[in-house]
Image (cartoon, helix red, strand yellow):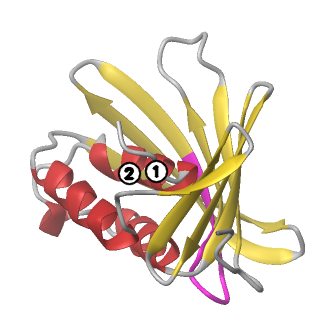
Amino acid sequence: MPIRSTALALAAAVLATSTTPRAAELSGDCKPVFAALEKSIQANHTTTTNRGTDVLHGVTVDGAVYIQVRGAWRKSEISARDNIAMSRENLKDASEFSCKALPDSVVDGTPAANYATHTVNDDVVIDTRIAIAKGTGLALSVVTRLPGGGGGDVVTRYAYGNVKAPI
C-alpha cells in the first residue's frame, strides 16, 4: 500500500465510505462537509492524528503529501488531487450517507461549524464529527468512530499556518 497522509486517508475514508445514490444528490447539510474536506485536502496543511497511543503526522504542500513513518518523512505516491479523484469515484458507487449540522463551537480559538456524518456501506457503520472553520471553510478536526465498537476514535487535527515540506 502506498504511503499516504493520515489526514488524506481520513478524509478519503469519509468520502470513500460515504454512501449516497449520486454525488449530485448530496443533502444541503452534506455540501459544506464535502466542500471543506476537498478544500482542506488541497490546502497546505499539517495533520496530527491520534488513535489510542499511536500518533501520526502528515504534511501537504502544493499538492504533494508527506507522512512520517517510524520517525522518517516520506513522500506519498498519491497526491492531494489523486486522493480527491479517488474519493469522488468511490462516492459514485455508494448507497447511503447522511450529514447533520451540530451546534457551533470554538476549536483552538477558532469559531467552527460542526457536522456529524453517518455512513452505512456493506453493513459497516462509520460515524464522523467534523469541525469546519467558519472564516476559512477549512477542516479543523475530524473525529472518526471506527466500526465494531472496540476500534475507538481516530482524531485528526489540521493546522494551516507556515507549512513547509519536511524533506
Amino acid at pointer 2:
Ala
> Which of pointers 1 and 2 lies earlier in the amino acid sequence?
1
Question: Closest to the observer: 34 or 73?
Answer: 73
Give the image location of residue 94, x and y in percent.
Answer: 16, 43
Decide: few, some or many residues near mark 2? Use Cα within 10 Å; few <14, some 14-19, many ≥20.
many
Range shown magenta = 129-139
Residue drawn at x 18%, y 49% is 90
Q: Which image quarter holds the N terminus?
A: top left
Mark in the foreground, 1 or 2 = 1
Quarter of the figure with residue 145: top right
Residue drawn at x 57%, y 12% is 149
Extreme-right residue of the structure? 109
Secondary structure under the numbered disc 1 in the rendered image: loop
Residue drawn at x 10%, y 45% is 93
Give the image location of residue 92, x and y in percent.
Answer: 11, 54
In the rendered view, does 142 fall on the left or right side of 38? right
In the rendered view, does 12 fall on the left or right side of 143? left
Secondary structure under the numbered disc 2 in the rendered image: helix
In the rendered view, does 133 fall on the left or right side of 65? right
The image's mark for residue 125 is none
Disc 1 marks which residue? 4
- Above or below, comparing residue 120 to residue 104 in the picture: above
Decide: few, some or many residues near mark 1? Use Cα within 10 Å; few <14, some 14-19, many ≥20.
many
Quarter of the figure with residue 19: top left
In the rendered view, does 123 fall on the left or right side of 127? left
Q: Which image quarter holds the C terminus?
A: bottom right
The image's mark for residue 12 is 2
Give the image location of residue 43, x and y in percent.
Answer: 53, 81
Residue drawn at x 61%, y 10% is 150
- Above or below, comparing residue 4 to residue 28 in the picture: above
For the residues bearing labels 1 and 2, Cβ distance under 8 angstroms: yes
Amino acid at pointer 1:
Arg
